[in-house]
Image (cartoon, rainbow, N blue to C red):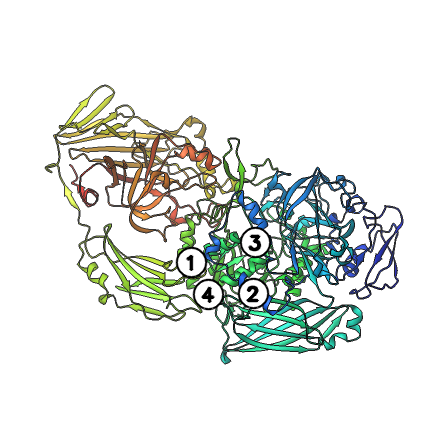
């Protein structure tokens, strides 16, 4: 079918299917191949030129290799997987995803079904073992309705060899016996199916740095499967596409070596037309693939994630006619002042060289048709009666002749759209573009289609504009990660991510740090997310601390230029038609040098419609169109934004490191972003914890991290830094993100409430506003708020005097009044049901009344007489009614027990506490400057309480007893730490001893049943900032109901509490714990006025509050701080037989600017300075009404 020419070239030995000696490889190449037609290739033992053959002769064209020896390429002297000049060969050039539609009707039906993704789809997401089959189902779903595309997903035969040189001999041949091989699902990562093991590293390479060499022990997966071609494909061309393979692979069809590729996140496509048995032959085709875990490409893929291998995206067969649509690009231009838009379409037609050379395509035509969008899912069906959406524009290209190179001819056409619906993340309107290639007689020859959004990106001084507006990017970084199937994608799970993002006001995603599955971009187009599409380039492991040698990076090595550039080119060519993609990124943490300038230059020339993003080299190089630092402090980003010489906007490519209990201080970033021109948002690191499901010895499953698989080297749990757990259960911090990202501003201005629309393209017409008023914990009223139509960026001041809450507030005798304004959707969206809260703001109204505190004195009628007993070891106090009894340890200076109606309230009395189980941020990646390192260095984790004075009875009346003691807190074996601490300067009472903490304690026992404890804390001022200053005690497990008046309902801390509203909340104690994969301080609640722990039947309980009226940080848990500190996984925690209660006068923030340096902001540090604390406790008995509020609003008169 393809006549051949004749050309003989002398090249180095290196084609693996030949013996190592001089030999001949017969190549059959069609005369219509792009560049070279090679018949005979004589191999000589020279060491030059082969890479040029791969890049110029084989890669761009479609050469066809005649069946030759079955010897594996791995067995030759040449190792392509260790040569940066050989990144691909015999692959087709990159292009947009092709769907090979038969006609317009089929294209529209396919895209209508693809556009049905919605909230209901997300509910089908699975995260356990069922994900294995769902991954196969998704691969098949993505080609459903495409008669000329076949998915080869399913179970393949698989064998794992220890290295390429030891693959089974001849496994590529069609007659190889693979009966005894295992079965492996494709797509998948083989490490998640009990072959080899996952490895997690952040920076360090998991092998010695010796580019381009990789370890000789290089696990190599051998895959085999069979397939048959449909009868309908006869006479057409057949292409084999691997959507992504990690990290490098060879492919054979029926024993013939077809090609090679690397870049584990982009497709590799091969023309296999001449090597397949047709349907009429009655023969099956045998497909064999050899995948190397490590290749020179691995040096470019040192991202902060799991190293997982295999065919992890789908493998598909595509059928095209001889004359075909090979590629097409769509560019849109918006003319705002005319309310019009132009759609420019360039089509690339591929045909036999002879037809192109003789102008044969002049008689062919191409038609471009643009259709309106479909309504929301389920509203309209496209059926066989051609019930198409309305047609917007149609234009025909008569004769494909604009330019021709080899087998390719381009045709270009423009369409004008009047009054276009523009695409943005707020209003992601998509048209459907259908491209039809027709024969001279008008018959449809080929058809392609995609969804397109009309939008324009431009640059202004310190701004990136979308449709002329300086949108704010409220973003997250997202790795492709599934806890069961790793890097393999599932439709419902992709949708789940987007739905959660939209529900939490995220409008932007950075595809860290590689191009993601093609379906991800379709969904971002559909749901509305701004995307940074990032090339699969990171060489972080080349950075020597403290990075004094920038030229060590591969970007300075010209030998790696082609490999790096090809990754950017292929990304842009695949993804160029997606409206959601706002920036192209050159990769991540790969230094900065000439290769980056080359990449930036190519991208800017190829696609001038989008800015280029790259952080490496300091985030302000000439290779980037935006200043895009990572983890820069808020004061520094403001400084850059205010620099008049810097004309680019600043957008944080990474910030607010979400590792465990984190994301403190994020509100400060957004206060700056909302107030500073030139700051245009940022992308939180990152979206999901990269935990992998692992089965423990007892059969239970848990989230595993680095080292849990015996992987060495590893970076432990540094892969767990998401806003969600691996199964997409949200972390409490995501509530804070939702708050700072909310697109509506609500604030108090004087006594008036101002509301403003932060959207750039959307009014607030689809929102219903409501109010509620809380006074000293009680709800005074609630109702709706009438807001006029607010267009984008408009403001409105509510005339408060006319609103119902105003009179309630002004007439209330309450001390503390909060007004909450909420905005909820009045109609359902693709991503959420009606009633979803988009924004919520709680405003503390000005105090009109002093706190009305009832002063209790000893003559109170409810105060019983007290009976005190003083023995050698104990002091007991009980009322005359004998309904409670309190026992003190005289020598220890603490309460032994407090029983009410024979039930223990305190099973271990309150003692001062200055320690918390370190969070990931406290540990700061084991940094010696970390908070936890400094705490342990002075023994804060081993403090024990001693009493130097014993308890003394200071005052006694008939219904009041006051006891005093002096406690000292020092580490066990304190002599080991004395070098770290020196005595404070001579002070009154200073004995010169090495004290850590001296605490004066006063116990005040009242006949009312109240206990007030005052603490005078005197710390050693040489101590580092403290985790907390407060008390802890234990109560019986029966007191499992926790109720509090303070911030909630979710976990919150002093530097992460803006989203948590003040109110009265109730949880079972089990639900107070936050199960971070690596345990640490968690479950706290901020600004607590009072808290109760009680039996579920409400028979008895305990009330605790600050006696001074100050709010507390509260924590109630089934786990001790020591339990949380020691456990390495949440599943290791064993519930205590007691409930642990912490009440803190001060608690240090959790931080989050990063997770490797001490970065809690100064205002959230707890300095070691004298402090006075006072807490009040009271038994709660059944049947008592208004007891909580009465107690909260009362105070005992000071005794003299």
Residue 1184's place in the image compared with 269, above or below, is above
Q: Position of residue 1144 (x, y in %)?
A: 32, 40
Quarter in which the N terminus is drawn: bottom right
Please give the label number shown on residue 832: 1
Mark closest to the chain's N terminus, 3 or 1 = 3
Q: Residues within 10 Å of mark 4 (few under 14, many from 20)?
A: few
Relative horizontal placement of residue 148, taking residue 779 as reference (left or right): right
Q: Which of marks 3 and 4 is nearer the N terminus?
A: 4
Can the viewer see residue 533 in this picture?
yes
Task: Say which residue label 4 marks.
Answer: 379
Quick check: marks 3 and 4 in contact, CB under 8 Å? no
| Label 3 element class | loop
- Label 2 secondary element: helix
Q: In the picture, which quadrant includes the C terminus? A: top left
Can you identify the residue that label 3 sits on? 512
Residue 971 image point, x, y percent: 40, 29
Is residue 145 shown above or below 920?
A: below
Measured Cα–Cα span from mark 2 to mark 3: 33 Å
Q: Determine crowd level at label 3: few under 14, some 14-19, many 20+ residues with C-alpha closer than 10 A.
A: many
Which tag, 1 or 2, sits closer to the chain's start? 2
- Closer to the chain start, of discs 4 and 2, is 2
In the rendered structure, which disc, 2 or 3, sits on the residue that comes first in sequence? 2
Q: For residue 561, say whether it is visible.
A: no
Q: In this view, does 558 lie to the left or right of 852?
A: right
Q: Quadrant of residue 1069?
A: top left
């Amino acid at each position: 079918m393809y006549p051949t020419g004749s050309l003989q070239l002398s090249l180095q030995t290196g084609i693996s299917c030949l013996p190592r000696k001089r030999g001949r490889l017969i190549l059959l190449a069609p005369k219509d191949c792009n560049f070279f037609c090679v018949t005979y290739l004589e191999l000589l033992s020279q060491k030059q030129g082969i890479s040029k053959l791969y890049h110029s002769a084989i890669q761009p064209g479609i050469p066809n290799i005649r069946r030759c020896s079955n010897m594996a390429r791995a067995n030759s002297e040449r190792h392509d997987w260790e040569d940066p000049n050989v990144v691909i060969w015999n692959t087709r050039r990159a292009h947009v995803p092709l769907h090979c539609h038969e006609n317009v009707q089929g294209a529209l039906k396919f895209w209508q079904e693809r556009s049905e993704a919605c909230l209901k789809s997300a509910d089908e997401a699975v995260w356990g073992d069922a994900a294995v089959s769902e991954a196969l189902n998704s691969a098949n779903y993505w080609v459903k309705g495409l008669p000329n595309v076949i998915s080869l997903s399913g179970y393949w035969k698989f064998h794992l060899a220890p290295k390429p040189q030891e693959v089974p001999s001849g496994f590529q041949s069609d007659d190889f016996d693979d009966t005894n091989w295992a079965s492996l699902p494709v797509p998948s990562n083989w490490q998640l199916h009990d072959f080899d093991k996952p490895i997690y590293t952040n920076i360090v390479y998991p092998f010695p740095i010796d580019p381009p060499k990789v370890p000789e022990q290089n696990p190599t997966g051998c895959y085999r499967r069979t397939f048959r071609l449909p009868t309908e494909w006869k006479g057409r061309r057949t292409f084999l596409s691997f959507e992504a393979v990690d990290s490098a692979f060879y492919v054979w069809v029926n024993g013939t070596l077809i090609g090679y590729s690397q870049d584990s996140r982009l497709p590799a496509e091969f023309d296999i037309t001449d090597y397949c048995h047709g349907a009429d032959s009655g023969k099956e085709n045998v497909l064999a693939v050899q995948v190397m875990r490590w290749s020179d490409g691995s040096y470019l893929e040192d991202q902060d994630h799991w190293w997982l291998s295999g065919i992890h995206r789908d493998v598909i067969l595509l059928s095209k006619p001889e004359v075909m649509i090979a590629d097409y690009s769509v560019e849109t231009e918006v003319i705002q002042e005319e309310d019009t838009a132009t759609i420019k379409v360039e089509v690339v037609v591929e045909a036999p060289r002879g037809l192109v050379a003789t102008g044969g395509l002049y008689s062919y035509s191409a038609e471009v048709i643009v259709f309106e969008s479909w309504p929301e899912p389920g509203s309209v069906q496209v059926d066989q009666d051609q019930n198409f959406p309305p047609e917007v524009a149609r234009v025909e290209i008569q004769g494909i002749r604009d330019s021709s190179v080899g087998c390719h001819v381009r045709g270009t056409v423009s369409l004008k759209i009047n009054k276009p619906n523009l695409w943005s993340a707020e209003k992601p309107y998509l048209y459907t573009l259908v491209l039809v290639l027709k024969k001279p007689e008008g018959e449809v020859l080929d058809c392609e289609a995609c969804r397109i959004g009309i939008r324009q990106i431009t640059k202004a001084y310190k701004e990136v504009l979308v449709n002329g507006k300086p949108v704010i990017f409220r973003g997250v970084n997202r790795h492709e990660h599934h806890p069961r199937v790793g890097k393999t994608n599932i439709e419902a799970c992709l949708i789940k991510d987007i739905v959660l993002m939209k529900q939490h006001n995220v409008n932007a995603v950075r595809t860290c740090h590689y191009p993601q599955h093609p379906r991800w971009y379709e969904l971002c187009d559909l749901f509305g997310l701004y995307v940074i599409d990032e090339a699969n380039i990171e060489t972080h492991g080349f950075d020597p601390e403290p990075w004094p040698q920038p030229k060590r990076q591969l970007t300075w090595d010209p030998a790696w230029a082609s490999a790096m550039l090809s990754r950017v080119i292929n990304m842009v060519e695949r993804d160029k038609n997606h409206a959601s993609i706002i920036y192209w990124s050159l990769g991540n943490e790969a230094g900065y040098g000439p290769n980056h300038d080359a990449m930036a230059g190519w991208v800017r020339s190829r696609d001038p419609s989008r800015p280029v993003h790259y952080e490496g080299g300091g985030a302000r190089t000439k290779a980037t169109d935006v200043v895009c630092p990572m983890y820069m402090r808020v004061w520094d980003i403001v400084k850059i934004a205010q620099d008049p010489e810097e004309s680019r906007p600043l957008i944080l490519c990474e910030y607010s490191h979400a590792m465990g209990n984190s994301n403190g201080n994020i509100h400060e970033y957004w206060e700056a972003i909302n107030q500073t021109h030139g700051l245009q948002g940022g992308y939180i690191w990152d979206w999901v914890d990269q935990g992998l499901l692992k089965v423990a010895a007892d059969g239970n499953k848990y989230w595993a991290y680095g080292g849990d698989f015996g992987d060495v080297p590893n970076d432990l749990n540094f892969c767990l830094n998401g806003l969600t757990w691996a199964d997409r259960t949200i972390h409490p911090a995501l509530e804070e993100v939702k708050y700072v990202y909310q697109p509506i501003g609500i604030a108090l201005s004087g006594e008036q409430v101002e509301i403003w629309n932060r959207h750039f393209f959307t009014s607030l017409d689809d929102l219903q506003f409501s109010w509620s008023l809380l006074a000293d914990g009680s709800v005074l009223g609630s109702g709706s708020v009438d807001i006029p139509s607010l267009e984008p960026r408009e403001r409105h001041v509510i005339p408060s005097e006319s609103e119902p809450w105003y009179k309630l507030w002004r007439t209330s005798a309450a001390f503390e009044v909060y007004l909450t304004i909420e905005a909820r959707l009045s109609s359902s969206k693709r991503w959420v049901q009606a009633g979803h809260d988009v924004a919520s703001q709680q405003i503390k109204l000005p105090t009109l009344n002093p706190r009305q505190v009832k002063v209790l004195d000893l003559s109170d009628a409810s105060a019983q007489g007290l009976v005190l007993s003083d023995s050698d070891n104990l002091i007991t106090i009980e009322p005359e009614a004998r309904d409670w009894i309190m026992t003190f340890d005289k020598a220890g200076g603490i309460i032994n027990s407090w029983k009410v109606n024979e039930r223990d309230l305190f099973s271990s009395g309150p003692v001062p506490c200055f320690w918390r189980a370190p969070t990931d941020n406290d540990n700061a990646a084991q940094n010696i400057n970390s908070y936890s390192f400094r705490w342990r260095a002075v023994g804060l984790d081993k403090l024990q309480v001693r009493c130097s004075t014993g308890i003394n009875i200071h005052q006694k009346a008939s219904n009041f007893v006051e006891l005093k003691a002096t406690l000292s807190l020092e580490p066990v074996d304190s002599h080991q730490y004395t070098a770290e601490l020196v005595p404070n300067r001579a002070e009154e009472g200073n004995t010169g001893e090495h004290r850590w903490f001296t605490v004066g304690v006063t116990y005040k026992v009242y006949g009312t049943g109240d206990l007030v404890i005052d603490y005078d804390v005197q710390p050693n001022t040489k101590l580092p900032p403290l985790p907390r200053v407060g008390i802890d005690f234990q109560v019986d497990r029966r007191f499992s109901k926790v109720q509090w008046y303070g911030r909630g309902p979710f976990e919150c801390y002093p530097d992460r509490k803006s989203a948590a509203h003040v109110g009265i909340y109730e949880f079972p104690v089990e639900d107070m714990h936050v199960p971070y994969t690596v345990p640490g301080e968690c479950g706290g609640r901020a600004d607590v006025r009072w808290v109760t722990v009680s039996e579920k039947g409400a028979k008895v309980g305990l009330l605790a509050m600050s006696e001074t009226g100050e709010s507390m940080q509260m924590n109630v848990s089934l786990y001790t701080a020591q339990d949380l500190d020691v456990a390495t996984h949440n599943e290791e925690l064993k519930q205590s037989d007691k409930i642990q209660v912490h009440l803190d006068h001060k608690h240090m923030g959790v931080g989050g600017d990063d997770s490797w340096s001490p970065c809690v902001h100064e205002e959230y540090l707890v300095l070691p300075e004298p402090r006075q604390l006072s807490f009040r406790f009271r038994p709660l008995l059944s049947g008592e009404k208004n007891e909580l509020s009465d107690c909260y609003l009362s105070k005992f008169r000071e005794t003299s």
